[in-house]
């Protein structure tokens, strides 16, 4: 039985008539950027997240970069981010000319924590980016308390947290802006690259709409230098089909995560934790595993796909590492042990049991 890390074909089969109709409808209209589907999706996703505004952009990286630009963050500024995240979080900061300042993460939630941020705040700090890692929201209340006290904005990197909640509120609705990726393997994924920014700040939304379209509010009139970072009309059409299914898919992910939790109890692996105030959406079911690389090889031989999210912490990446990178023990320990197991709504309980059985066998010495 082969079990992939993600099975995009299974989801497409379930939605094929709706998806095909949506794509063909967009092609029939041939208004292929900033058209009917983009505007409708922006309204629908804003309502889903519980915010006033959504601005569709080309990718999650665009979302982060444009928010920083719209907040006038650039050379000389510092932005505090967790080191345990996908490189795009650091990249977006670097692209503005600002300096990413890397914080360690909480060893349980694997997200940015107030204790990691507080010592790094300085008179050069212009923002803090909280990454909701693997679908687990960061401890947002304490981060908001710190950023408000220091009068800097909190930005949510919600690229892995579509539909997640903290204290009853959706990801993307707590900070000054929420930055989403709709990369095809996300809980809400397009069929290519796509992203969005959510916010309750009307002025910020207005500037983002200009920046994503070459700094233009009126065609051929450019108030500032922007980017070509618009959400594609066909991708918006796909996202509109998928959005009504997101809560059901997230419920299914939580059900399967509970099966993993029970099946892996008593093994040496550390299963994901959930904050009491939060609702996890399990973009990844990421365990911390002794002998991680050996376990991944063993599972691959059994036909089971895995992923490592992520093997090198950002503060050790050549592109952004300083001459003397800080010591961030939690981020470094996680990078050496983290392993994502197959998890997607179409996965069956029997497949989860198969994966867990192989993990138990590995730690028993390889006997199934």
Image (cartoon, rainbow, N blue to C red):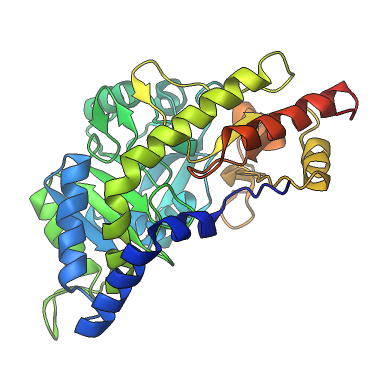
Q: Residue at x 41, y 58 (%)?
A: 61
Who's the residue at 31% across and 63% down the image?
Answer: 18
Q: Is residue 284 above or below residue 117?
A: below
Q: Nearer the viewer, residue 38 or 62?
A: 38
Give the image location of residue 132, x and y in percent.
41, 36
Judge whether residue 237 can be spotted in this image: yes
Is residue 213 depicted above or below 244 in this figure?
Answer: below
Q: Is residue 221 left or right of residue 299?
A: left
Left or right of 58 in this view: 315: right
Residue 253 rendering spot, x and y as whole percentages: 47, 35
Quadrant location of the C terminus in the rendered image? top right
Is 50 or 74 nearer to us in this picture? 50
Q: Is residue 124 visible?
A: no
Q: How many marks?
A: 0
Q: Position of residue 347 (x, y in %)?
A: 55, 42
> Left of 332 or right of it: where is 126?
left
Residue visible at 57% across and 38% down in the picture: 348
Image quarter for residue 163? top left
* Frontmost residue, 174 versus 170: 170
How far across and down, in percent of the image, does residue 113 sit? 43, 25
Q: Residue at x 60, y 49 (%)?
A: 321
The answer to whether 272 appears left or right of 32 in the picture is right
Closest to the observer, 70 or 284: 284
Quadrant hosting residue 150:
top left
């Amino acid at each position: 039985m082969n079990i992939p890390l993600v099975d995009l074909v299974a989801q497409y089969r379930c939605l094929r008539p709706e998806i095909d109709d949506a794509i063909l409808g967009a092609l029939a209209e041939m208004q292929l950027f900033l058209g009917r589907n983009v505007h409708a999706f922006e309204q629908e996703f804003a309502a889903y997240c519980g915010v006033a505004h959504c601005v569709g952009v080309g990718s999650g990286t665009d979302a982060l970069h444009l928010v920083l630009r719209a907040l006038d963050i650039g050379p000389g500024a510092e932005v505090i981010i967790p080191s345990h995240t996908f490189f795009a979080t650091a990249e977006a900061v670097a692209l503005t000319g600002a300096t990413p300042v890397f914080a360690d993460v909480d060893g349980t939630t694997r997200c940015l924590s107030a204790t990691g941020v507080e010592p790094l705040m300085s008179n050069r700090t212009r923002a803090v980016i909280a990454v909701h890692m693997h679908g687990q929201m960061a401890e947002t209340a304490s981060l908001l308390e710190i950023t408000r006290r220091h009068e800097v904005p909190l930005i949510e990197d919600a690229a892995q947290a579509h539909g997640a909640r903290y204290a009853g509120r959706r990801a993307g609705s707590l900070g000054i802006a929420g930055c989403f990726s709709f990369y095809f393997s996300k809980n809400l994924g397009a069929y290519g690259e796509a992203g969005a920014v959510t916010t309750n700040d009307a002025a910020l939304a207005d500037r983002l709409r200009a920046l994503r379209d070459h700094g233009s509010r009126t065609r051929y009139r450019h108030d500032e230098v922007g980017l070509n970072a618009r959400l594609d009309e066909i991708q918006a059409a796909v996202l509109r089909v998928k959005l009504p299914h997101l809560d059901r898919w997230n419920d299914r992910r939580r059900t399967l995560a509970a099966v993993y939790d029970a099946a892996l109890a008593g093994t040496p692996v550390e299963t994901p934790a959930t904050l009491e105030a939060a609702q996890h959406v399990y973009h990844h079911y990421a365990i911390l595993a002794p002998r991680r690389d050996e376990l991944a090889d063993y599972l691959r031989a059994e036909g089971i796909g895995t992923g490592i999210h992520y093997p090198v912490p950002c503060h050790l990446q050549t592109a952004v590492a300083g001459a003397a990178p800080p010591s961030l023990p939690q981020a470094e320990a996680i990078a050496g042990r983290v392993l994502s197991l197959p998890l997607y709504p179409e996965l069956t309980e029997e497949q989860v049991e198969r994966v867990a059985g192989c993990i138990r066998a590995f730690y028993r010495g390889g006997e199934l």
